[in-house]
């Protein structure tokens, strides 16, 4: 039981990761795929952020009288990763808009049927 | 200047990219990109020279000492890969002028060169950096711009293949991010050299093994290692010709470099053989060489055929890594260089055909060999190099690869390498048959030879193929030096 | 949207506040949580709100796409330019210490300029993305 409760942040991250990954693989709708990809990325962000917590640590802003701070580095890393995620989502959605204009659909199997691929 | 060499290599294209984006339409953006890539190629040459003669370069960004700050750490391996990337870019750019004007709408050309420079900066950043998270950032810079560039292809399939690549590439990069996170949680550092010091102490832990697996899978996706190669044939087929040339000869090479760097520098030596990783590399290498070569035979689109051939060639490099010996890694690095030369030349020649007739399916190109003799010549010599005929660069890499396999007494691998060459002969034979031995179709009879501006860069690469096939001293010397710098033990 | 009086009044009051808050986040980033990225997004959201309430054309009159593209490039160039200046002053790339007489003043000045560059670039890019999607398919 301790194993489950004590690592709850990892369980949440794993659950989100698998949910997102499954959505990317199983859905044929291109927008839903992007949403799945977002969930997948966010799970990794959570993993980093929860990792940076120090027991009893204050937020990493220098304040008088506080000795222990949480680790600020993962926050900075994840800020960068979030920016990357935003760019990826925007680019992905832009492609979906263009695909919709070119094919008239955003369903994967319909696109394959039109191109005679698969 | 000398001190900031390794930094300027990344900063110059990074600064030039936003400048190119706001330049007016016309040839000015192209000229900026040309200047930048030539400057970078020169700097990369100087950097390799400096590293070979004076040893490792370490550059501290912002003046923060490693492992706290980001460090650019250049040894022979990255200096060599940086030279390949910037050299290929500098040769591609003269070729780009006409090809891009033909394939890209006028109002998008400044943005095209801006994205190209960003992609270039990202690839160079990956090779230069010594910080594993900084590597992720550069990886995403290069990937995002390459998705955009691929989507600019003329046919609508370019959009779907860019989308497919975006999904696969982002999954790969996120896997890499998970792996880095797990390793950071265990060691508390992101600097590669610092990691190399700390990892041996904890390399038995499950966290480290999981992180290692995530990083390897993530980069195998970017590398298009069989069976994670599904995005590559589509992306290469539908991208604009210039982008196919550039990505085929640099992007996968840089991914391979990262693989080698993480396997042999960051992780303790012997880690790769202690885990199933080495066997998996050999296995996927063998499967990739055989299946992708067979796939290539059945393709009717020449670009797609060459793309499948690229998957097979990546298999050769994976084989070299999988041997995990000094000889194997040397062979992989030699092939990395030679493959950039031959695929660059071949895709350029195919691009020249597309420039003239707008397509490159087998039925479109019939008899073109006699109308476009120089382009045809480039395809023949590039094909010979791909097969590995003595006197071409391809022979050198096959030779070292076979030596590495013999050293391990991996007979199956030897047979596979030779079979791969035979299969290459079959698929390149198909292209040559269509180009030369089929009668000229009526539409093709008026086609003229490609313009000089396309032929010259193509032939520079073709001549490089022959030169480095006859005089292998430079490639082999640098590759052996690189394997030593990685600290791979000879078996 | 011309008849939604409440919406128009509220957003007219709120938009200046959002802009001021964005500037606070931008320039207080040295001392507290904040910085260029957050400020750029907040500032961008104020214009996006304006576009949602008063229409895309009105918003594009304030920030035409050519201006936005210039701003995005300018932001990146400001960031990279600070680095080039430090190189010129015999420092390493982005070594802010050399920018002013004392080490602390140099660090302050450097991070302020760099974050300003980030803020401008993020602001412009957010709007470019929004306009690109929202303006798609218009005659």
Image: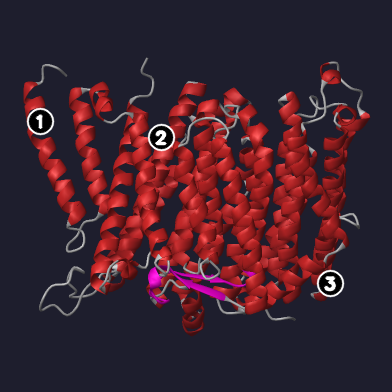
Of labels 1 and 2, the one closer to you: 1
Tag 2's secondary structure? Answer: helix
The disc at residue C12 is 1
Q: Which residues are magenta?
A: B57-77
Q: Chain of mark 2?
A: A
Q: CA distance from mark 1 to mark 2?
A: 34 Å
**Residue C45 placement, left or right of B189:** left
Residue hosting label 3? B406
Residue B63 belongs to the span the image colors magenta:
yes
Residue plotted at (62% across, 61% down): B44
Tag 3's secondary structure? Answer: helix
The disc at residue A31 is 2
Q: Residues within 10 Å of mark 3 (few under 14, many from 20)?
A: some
Most extreme residue toward the bottom is B201
Q: Chain of mark 1?
A: C
Number of on-image labels? 3
Of labels 3 and 1, the one closer to you: 1
Q: Is residue B45 above or below residue B154?
A: below
User: Do pointers 1 and 2 mark residues of a single chain?
Assistant: no
Contact flag, marks 2 and 3 (Cβ < 8 Å) = no
Residue B194 or residue B377, whichever sits in front? B377
Contact flag, marks 1 and 2 (Cβ < 8 Å) = no
Q: Locate residue C19, reporting x and y percent.
A: 16, 42
Q: Locate residue A66, reporting x and y percent.
A: 13, 77
Q: Locate residue B125, reporting x and y percent.
A: 52, 59
Residue B43 belongs to the span the image colors magenta:
no
């Amino acid at each position: 039981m301790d194993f489950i409760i004590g690592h709850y942040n990892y369980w949440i991250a794993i659950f989100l990761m698998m949910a997102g990954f499954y959505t990317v693989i199983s859905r044929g709708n291109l927008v839903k795929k992007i949403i799945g990809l977002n969930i997948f990325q966010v799970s990794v962000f959570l993993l980093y952020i929860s990792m940076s917590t120090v027991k009893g640590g204050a937020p990493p802003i220098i304040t008088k009288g506080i000795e222990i701070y949480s680790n600020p580095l993962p926050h900075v890393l994840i800020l960068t990763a979030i920016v990357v995620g935003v760019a990826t989502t925007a680019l992905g959605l832009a492609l979906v808009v263009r695909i919709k204009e070119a094919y008239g659909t955003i369903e994967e199997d319909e696109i394959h049927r039109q191109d005679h691929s698969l | 200047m000398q001190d900031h060499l390794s930094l300027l290599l990344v900063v110059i294209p990074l600064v030039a990219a936003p400048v190119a984006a706001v330049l007016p339409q016309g040839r000015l953006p192209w000229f900026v990109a040309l200047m930048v890539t030539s400057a970078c190629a020169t700097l990369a040459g100087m950097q390799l020279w400096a590293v070979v003669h004076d040893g490792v370069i370490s550059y501290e960004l912002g003046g923060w000492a490693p492992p706290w700050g980001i460090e650019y750490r250049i040894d022979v391996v990255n200096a060599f890969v940086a030279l390949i990337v910037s050299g290929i870019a500098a040769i591609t750019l003269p070729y780009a002028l006409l090809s891009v004007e033909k394939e890209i709408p006028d109002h998008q050309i400044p943005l095209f060169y801006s994205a190209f420079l960003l992609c270039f900066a990202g690839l160079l950043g990956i090779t230069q950096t010594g910080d594993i998270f900084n590597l992720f950032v550069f990886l995403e810079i290069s990937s995002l711009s390459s998705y955009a560039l691929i989507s600019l292809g003329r046919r609508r399939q370019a959009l779907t293949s860019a989308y497919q690549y975006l999904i696969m590439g982002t999954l790969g990069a996120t896997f890499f991010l998970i792996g880095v996170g797990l390793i950071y949680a265990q060691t508390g550092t992101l600097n590669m050299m610092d990691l190399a010091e700390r990892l041996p102490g904890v390399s038995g832990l499950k966290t480290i093994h999981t992180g290692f697996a995530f990083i390897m899978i993530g980069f195998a996706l970017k590398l298009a290692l069989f069976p994670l190669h599904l995005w590559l044939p589509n992306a290469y087929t539908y991208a604009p010709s210039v982008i196919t040339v550039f990505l085929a000869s640099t992007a996968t090479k840089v991914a391979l470099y990262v693989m080698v760097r993480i396997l042999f520098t960051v992780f303790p030596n012997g880690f790769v053989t202690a885990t199933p990783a080495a066997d998996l590399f050999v296995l996927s290498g063998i499967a990739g060489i055989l299946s992708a070569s067979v796939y290539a035979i059945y393709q009717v689109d020449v670009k797609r055929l060459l793309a499948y051939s690229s998957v097979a060639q990546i298999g050769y490099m994976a084989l070299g890594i999988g041997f995990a010996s000094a000889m194997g890694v040397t062979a992989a690095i030699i092939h990395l260089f030679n493959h950039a030369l031959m695929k660059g030349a071949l895709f350029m020649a195919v691009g020249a055909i597309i420039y003239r007739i707008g397509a490159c399916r087998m039925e479109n190109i019939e008899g073109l060999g006699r109308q476009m003799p120089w382009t045809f010549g480039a395809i023949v010599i590039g094909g010979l190099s791909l097969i590995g005929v003595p006197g071409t660069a391809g022979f050198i890499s096959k030779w070292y690869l076979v030596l590495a396999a013999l050293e391990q007494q991996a007979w199956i691998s030897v047979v596979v390498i030779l079979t791969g060459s035979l299969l290459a002969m079959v698929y390149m034979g198909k292209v040559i048959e269509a180009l030369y031995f089929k009668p000229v179709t009526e539409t093709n009879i008026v086609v003229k030879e490609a313009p000089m501006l396309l032929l010259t860069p193509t032939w520079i690469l073709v001549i490089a193929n022959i030169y480095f096939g006859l005089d292998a001293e430079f490639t082999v010397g640098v590759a052996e030096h690189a394997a030593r710098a990685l600290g791979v033990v000879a078996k | 949207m011309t008849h939604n009086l409440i919406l128009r009044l509220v957003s007219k009051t709120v938009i200046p506040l959002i802009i001021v808050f964005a500037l606070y986040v931008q320039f207080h980033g040295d001392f507290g949580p904040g910085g260029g990225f957050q400020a750029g997004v907040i500032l961008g959201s104020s214009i996006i709100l304006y576009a949602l309430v008063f229409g895309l054309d009105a918003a594009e009159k304030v920030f035409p796409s050519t201006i936005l593209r210039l701003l995005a490039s300018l932001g990146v160039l400001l960031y990279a330019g600070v680095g080039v200046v430090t190189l010129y002053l015999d420092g390493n790339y982005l070594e802010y210490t050399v920018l002013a007489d004392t080490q602390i003043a140099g660090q302050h000045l450097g991070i302020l300029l760099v974050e300003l560059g980030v803020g401008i670039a993020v602001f412009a890019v957010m709007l470019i993305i929004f306009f690109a999607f929202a303006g798609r398919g218009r005659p």
